[in-house]
Image: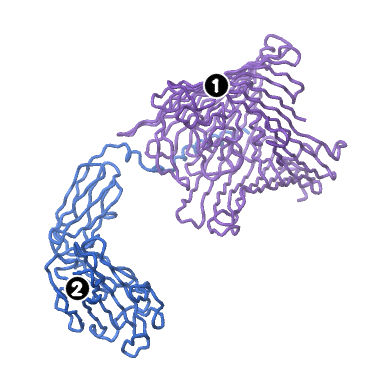
Chain colours: A purple, B blue
């Protein structure tokens, strides 16, 4: 311990505010928050032989909300943040339709300049295999014109853009620095309450995580991670207890050979999934490894990488496999259409603007997913029953006017489903950002973005069993240009096509496959739109845009017809 | 650092090569849903003859191209007894198709020729295999009577002087077990009682019956047959305990448990089994508080009585009775 020269904080959550506090005079009390007004005017048209006389074709919805936050600093090393949401749906004057909610509440501080803590609402993550809020399907292919809508949904669901999960609990972070052999070791510990007991068959459900990271030097760092999603025994009359501990180790090595910077990182670990005292529940033990080596030629800003991974079929990690989108949900807008009032499926249009389609809390088991949107990585990096490799490159050129990323992924199942034949997965992915104004040396911003993803799932058939062949493609193009002063024009196109045949698993309450249903799709979704955005400041803007969403079903026997929704959206968004 | 990357990359390749560690597949077989059905191996029995009385068993085998719902029905050519085995599998073998001589429903098998018939859900094929039963399965338990021999001289009977009275051992109709059974019938238009049999423990060599003292482990079993067209028969079984151990049953002071069987459902033989600890005390068919100490004490059972009853205004009543026995730990399996 003589080698320990000092202690420092290396917390992941609370650094910024209190660091500033130590250096500058800060106010004891300050207000912060966000405000927005959202208005949608929709017009539905359906491709049906007999006109729909039941569904109202036009729909108008608007609301204003303010998240009013208060940051109180009663002492040098303590801060209290609370935020109250006031929402008023248009037409709800004089108290009707107005809701008040506590949106956020936490206390954070520092003990003896050594240990940081936060109690209440905590945003936390570890690694993609232990505790990680994976991006939702298609969200990375949303052009800027539509991302204004998606940003509101993400904000409402506490998806902060850093893949953290918002939990209610307590977090503690601390670290020590060494002067020889090891630079520093950092510890992070978190526990949150996922669900309250009902006293009967549901005990208190908690999620706890811990991490230790050893930074040996700028070349080598090592980490050990632990996460457990579990029932707290004795808090309900049932003796059944769900446990899902995950233990992983990760490492990163970095070195530079002349103009070539090499990095290698990897993570491997195992999981255990069990309901104790339930003789019918299966015990699942799974493991995984994930490695990646990247080389970057710095003069060209060109990087290439290759990665290999294997995630066992029985690998379960609630903290990393919980999905954002709840595909069992149904859209609120035009929930049922046609004279038969058929339930409308969730589309990428709904995912852009309906916060209720998303999930806020960690879930045990594997949530439902829609193969059209992502059949390869439905549960992010920790998607079970996958093994294969990925290669890719990234390049920044033309004086940083052009940024390009491209990758190819090839995976297969490890264990078959309903057959010994394994599914094969292939994904091509590319996106580019071009700052046209830099190329033509124009002062005002002109930016073009483009992205594409092509996914293929296949599996050989066998006597009588049809083969699996599912092709899904996503195309995204965005354009934004500063016209005059603070006025921008934004345009966007997002297209999603899908065709083929797949089997969808039916599972029991233990997440075991009990049957398969045939899943045939042939159609497309397309959203095209544009609008004008006035930027009052970097964090405040006013935007009006027109979007047209269309869904085409090419299957003759599909009961859901093709339809189009024309949408006018008005957005006023402010952060303060 | 150069030395680090090579081993690291090698380790990655090693891990990749080790990752195929799973076998089989998850979920039900898709081949069972979509695959073509064919019989790869026809139905066969492990032996053409079988002697169940010698402890032998018979196993069946067959093989299909996919998992199917199958059913084997073994039928006795003489008795008409039936034993069925059902399953969902691709293979039929000793793990899922064993016959120990039991019958699924009454009557029981005799020493006779039988035929096993295999049917498959959704398929027209029916496969058969002949079997000859040389000896029937051994019946274990305290047998009060199977009515194959003479009337037990230790029993006593009372039969009303009504019309068409028949309290006899006979083989006029097929028996539930063996070839003979006890026929109870007649018309008594002034009383519910047609006739009764008292079976004292002394008929089996001791004052009380040699039964396990745990009432949860003792089962009374009897085979009764409802006669087609007659729905008025009631058979009441009474179990008298010698609570005080004086060698006699004292009315109104010691326990009298009962089972009442109304023969008004399906025609034909049925097996009645009752756990001793579940027998109520009945007065005129209604449960009442126990008469004696209220403790189920099978080892103190001193007499079993069988009363053939019928509503006096209902006319002719009749019932057949066959194999009557006590078993331990579980009901009798025919």
Label 1: chain letter: A
Q: Nearer the viewer, residue A122 or A37?
A: A37
Label 2: chain letter: B
Residue drawn at the location 56% of the way across and 40% of the way down: A322
Give the total of numbered labels.
Answer: 2
Res. A239 in view: yes
- Where residue A278 sits in the image (x, y, percent)? 48, 56
Res. A494 in view: no
For disc 2, the marked residue is B146
Image-based side of A505 in relation to A96, left or right: left
Q: Nearer the viewer, residue B265 or B161?
A: B161
Image-based side of B231 in relation to A81, left or right: left
Quarter of image, res B203: bottom left
Name, please, the residue furthest toward the bottom: B246
Pointer 2 and pointer 1 on the same chain? no
- Where residue B150 sits in the image (x, y, percent)? 14, 78
- Where residue A388 sits in the image (x, y, percent)? 48, 33
* Residues at marks 2 and 1, CA–CA distance in whole angstroms: 82 Å
For disc 1, the marked residue is A549
| Residue B305 drawn above or below residue A473 | below
Label 1: few (<14), some or many (≥20) within 10 Å? many
| Residue A47 drawn above or below residue A341 | above
- Where residue A518 sits in the image (x, y, percent)? 39, 34
């Amino acid at each position: 311990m003589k080698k320990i020269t000092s202690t420092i904080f290396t917390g992941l959550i609370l650094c910024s505010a209190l660091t500033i506090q130590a250096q500058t005079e800060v106010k004891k009390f300050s207000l912060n928050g966000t405000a927005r007004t959202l208005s949608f005017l929709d017009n539905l048209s359906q491709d049906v032989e007999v006109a729909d006389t039941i569904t109202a074709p036009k729909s108008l919805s608007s609301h204003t909300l303010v998240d009013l936050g208060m940051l109180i600093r009663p002492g040098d090393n303590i801060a209290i943040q609370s935020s109250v949401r006031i929402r008023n749906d248009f037409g709800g004057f004089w108290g009707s339709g107005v809701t008040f909610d506590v949106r956020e509440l936490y206390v954070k501080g520092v003990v003896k300049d050594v240990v940081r803590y936060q109690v209440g609402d905590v945003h936390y993550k570890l690694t993609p295999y232990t505790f990680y809020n994976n991006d939702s399907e298609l969200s990375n292919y949303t052009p800027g014109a539509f991302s204004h809508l998606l940003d509101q949904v993400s904000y409402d669901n506490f998806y902060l853009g850093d893949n953290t999960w918002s939990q209610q609990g307590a977090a503690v972070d601390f670290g020590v620095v060494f002067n020889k052999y090891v630079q520093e070791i950092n510890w992070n510990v978190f526990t949150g309450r996922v669900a309250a007991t009902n006293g009967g068959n549901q005990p208190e459900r908690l999620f706890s995580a811990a991490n230790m990271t050893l930074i040996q030097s700028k070349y080598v760092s090592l980490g050990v991670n632990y996460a457990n999603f579990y029932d707290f025994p004795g808090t309900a009359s049932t003796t059944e207890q769900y446990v899902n501990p995950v233990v992983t180790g990760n490492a990163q090595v970095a070195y530079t050979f002349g103009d070539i910077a090499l990095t290698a990182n990897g993570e491997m670990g195992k999981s255990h999934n069990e309901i104790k005292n339930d003789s019918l529940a299966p015990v699942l033990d799974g493991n995984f490894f994930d490695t990646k080596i990247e080389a970057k030629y710095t003069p060209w800003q060109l990087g290439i990488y290759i990665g290999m991974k294997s995630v066992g079929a029985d690998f379960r990690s609630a903290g990393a496999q919980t999905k954002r989108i709840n595909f069992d949900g149904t859209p609120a807008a035009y929930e049922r259409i046609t004279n038969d009032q058929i339930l409308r499926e969730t589309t990428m249009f709904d995912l852009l603007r309906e916060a209720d389609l998303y999930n806020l809390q960690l879930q045990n088991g594997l949530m439902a997913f829609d193969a059209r949107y992502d059949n390869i990585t439905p549960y992010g990096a920790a998607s079970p029953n996958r093994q294969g490799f990925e290669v890719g490159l990234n390049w920044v050129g033309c004086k940083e006017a052009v940024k390009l990323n491209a990758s190819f992924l090839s995976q297969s199942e490890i264990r078959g489903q309903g057959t010994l034949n394994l599914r094969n997965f292939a994904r091509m992915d590319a996106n580019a950002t071009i700052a046209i104004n830099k190329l033509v040396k124009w002062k005002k911003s002109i930016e073009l973005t483009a992205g594409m993803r092509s996914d293929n799932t296949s599996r050989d058939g066998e006597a009588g069993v049809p083969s699996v062949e599912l092709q899904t493609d996503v195309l995204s193009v965005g354009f934004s240009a500063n016209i005059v002063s603070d006025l921008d024009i934004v345009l966007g196109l997002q297209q999603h096509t899908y065709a083929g045949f797949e089997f969808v698993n039916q599972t029991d309450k233990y997440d075991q496959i009990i049957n398969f249903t045939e899943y045939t799709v042939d159609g497309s979704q397309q959203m095209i739109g544009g609008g004008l955005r006035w930027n009052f400041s970097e964090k405040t803007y006013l935007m009006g845009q027109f979007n047209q969403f269309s869904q085409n079903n090419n299957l003759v026997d599909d009961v859901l017809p093709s339809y189009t929704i024309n949408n006018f959206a008005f957005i006023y968004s402010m952060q303060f | 650092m150069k030395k680090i990357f090579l081993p690291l990359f090698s380790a990655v390749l090693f891990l990749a090569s080790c990752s195929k560690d799973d076998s089989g597949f998850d979920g039900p077989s898709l081949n069972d849903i979509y695959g073509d059905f064919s019989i790869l191996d026809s139905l066969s029995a492990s032996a053409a003859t079988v002697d169940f009385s010698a402890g032998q068993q018979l196993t069946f085998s067959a093989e299909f191209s996919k998992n199917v719902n199958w059913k084997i029905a073994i039928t006795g050519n003489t008795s008409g007894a039936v034993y069925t085995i059902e399953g969902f599998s691709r293979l039929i073998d000793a793990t899922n198709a064993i016959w120990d001589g039991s019958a699924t429903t009454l009557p029981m098998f005799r020493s006779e020729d039988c035929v096993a018939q295999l049917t498959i859900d959704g398929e027209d094929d029916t496969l058969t295999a002949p079997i000859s039963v040389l000896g029937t399965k051994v019946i274990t338990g305290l047998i009060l009577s199977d009515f194959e021999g003479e009337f037990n001289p230790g029993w006593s009977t009372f039969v009303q002087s009504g019309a068409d009275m028949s309290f006899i051992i006979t083989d006029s109709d097929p028996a539930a077990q063996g070839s003979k059974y006890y026929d109870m019938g007649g018309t008594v238009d002034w009383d519910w009682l047609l006739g009764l049999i008292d079976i004292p423990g002394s008929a089996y060599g001791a004052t009380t019956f040699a039964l396990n003292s745990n009432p949860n482990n003792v089962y009374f079993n009897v085979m009764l047959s409802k006669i087609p067209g007659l729905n008025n028969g009631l058979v009441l079984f009474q179990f008298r305990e010698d609570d005080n151990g004086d060698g006699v049953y004292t009315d109104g002071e010691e326990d009298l448990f009962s089972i009442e069987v109304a023969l008004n459902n399906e025609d034909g033989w049925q097996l009645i089994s009752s756990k001793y600890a579940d027998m109520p005390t009945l007065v005129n068919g209604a449960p009442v508080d126990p008469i004696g100490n209220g403790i189920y004490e099978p080892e103190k059972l001193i007499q079993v009585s069988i009363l053939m009853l019928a509503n006096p205004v209902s006319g002719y009543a009749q019932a057949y009775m066959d194999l009557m026995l006590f078993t331990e730990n579980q009901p009798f399996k025919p």
